Image (tube, rainbow, N blue to C red):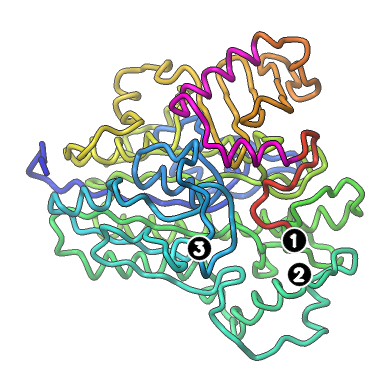
Amino acid sequence: MTKRNSGASRNVILLIFDTLRKDCISAYGSPPWGNVKTPNFDSLASESIIFDRAFPESLPTLPARRAIYTGQRTYPFHNGDFSLKGDFRGAPGWGPIPEEQHTIAEVLQESGYRTGLIADVYHMFKPSKNFWRGFDQWTFLRGQEGDPQRSGPEISDEELAKWVPSLLINDLRLSFVRQCLKNMYGRIREEDYFVPQVMLEAVRWLDHNNDADNFFLCIESFDPHEPWFVPDHYRQLYDGSEGPEQVMSTYDDVSDWPPQLLSRTKANYSGLVTMCDRWFRYLFESLRTRGLLDNTLLILTTDHGHSFGEEGYLGKRGYPSEPSVYDIPLMVRPPGGNGSGQKLDAIVQHTDIPPTILDFAGVDPKTPMEGRSLLDIQQSGDNHHREHATIAWGSAFTVVNDHWWLNTKVDGTGAFLYDLNLKSPREKNLANERPEIVEKLFAKAVKDAGGEFPEYLIELARTQTDAPGCSALAPRPL
């Protein structure tokens, strides 16, 4: 493996929060329900290059990470119809990184980098998964969601009733929350929660590896993904009422929910975002006190966002697609913080992250990657880096360019077309009025898919609902 640069250390930290809405970082704006407190993310933004039109390549959790870790397209999920023992059937592409693809950790490891992965994203560590390839150390912090970390003690009906509102009770939800509470049993201090544990372990890794000439550390926090269990003081920043708790994403229509129930849901999510922000500060200040901020490239992003009542839906889905899910934060802090809060509106995607890391490290990729270095985009001032983005989830895809947002299934049915130049783009579906635009954007997505879709994906599209409210593409309706 060729390394082009030598001399001073060139460290890299890739920090991925799962389900972090872009508009919940104050530097980007605020969500419809009001400002979320993120002073430390905002401080990072003031020293970073901020990408204002960043999108995933494929969704949800595992397909997104396949693209982030390799710089290769996961779409259109050829050989991606996974049904692996020990895992649920998540979505097309919900599987391991293909053996023939090289991960950035492997490439950097072969170039002399010391590599580490700290993660509580339990999907990455299920049977048959291999997302730890290329890491000298990988640490899996257990207990998120339904991870069978603990088998007891059994949770009382009274405790369950506290967390599952009567409106939402069914066997699946009760079972899910029961396992979550088992995993959290004995949790007393804030430091016992998941995101603090991830950040504490990441700093521990830094201390144990301070003799490395160059390091690559990937930090994966499943928070602020649901369930939104958070210490009361964080939730009370956004809802001080004594109403019922609600910590689950139901992946369903919530337009008939009592307003207070949806408000409590948003408050718990907002509180968890603020908690992530608080513990990001611990990581950032640890970098400062260890003298690492002047020789470390820090990238912060997420896999996707989440809908909280937009178009009546609570959850995330590939069809119909929502900006609240697909429009993601991406901040790149160069060493010394000389990004200076510069905002770029070039269309960028997850596949641009690995070329950025290798460009900074001065290491050549083993094989060509789909993306382009974000540092190169910033230095060249090229806001036309990509004419459009194709984002895939299951049997549907979304194409976004400067003017249009197209969401349709791979068989061409059920198109949603929105004009992004309108004040309220999503008020009207223009697919029937502008079929020539649908056809043009559909052709771009087919080209990005390599010219064809796998037959199983086309068949999947044929069996799924065309209308809004479709939840069949959500990975786990509860």
Q: Nearer the viewer, residue 310 or 188?
A: 310
Distance from the alpha carbon under mark 1 to that under mark 2: 6 Å
The residue under label 3 is 84
Q: Residues within 10 Å of mark 1 (few under 14, many from 20)?
A: some
Q: Quadrant of the N terminus?
A: top left
Distance from the alpha carbon under mark 2 to that under mark 3: 21 Å
Marking on residue 172: 2
> Is residue 446 covered in magenta?
yes
Q: Residues within 10 Å of mark 2 (few under 14, many from 20)?
A: few
Marking on residue 339: none
Residue 13 placement (x, y as % from top left):
32, 51
Residue 85 to residue 348: above or below = below
**Residue 414 horizontal side relative to residue 101, left or right:** right
Mark 1 touches mark 2? (CB < 8 Å)? yes
Q: Which residues are magenta?
A: 437-464
**Residue 360 horizontal side relative to residue 98, left or right:** left
Mark 2 touches mark 3? (CB < 8 Å)? no
Please tell me in which quadrant of the rendered image residue 291 appears.
bottom left
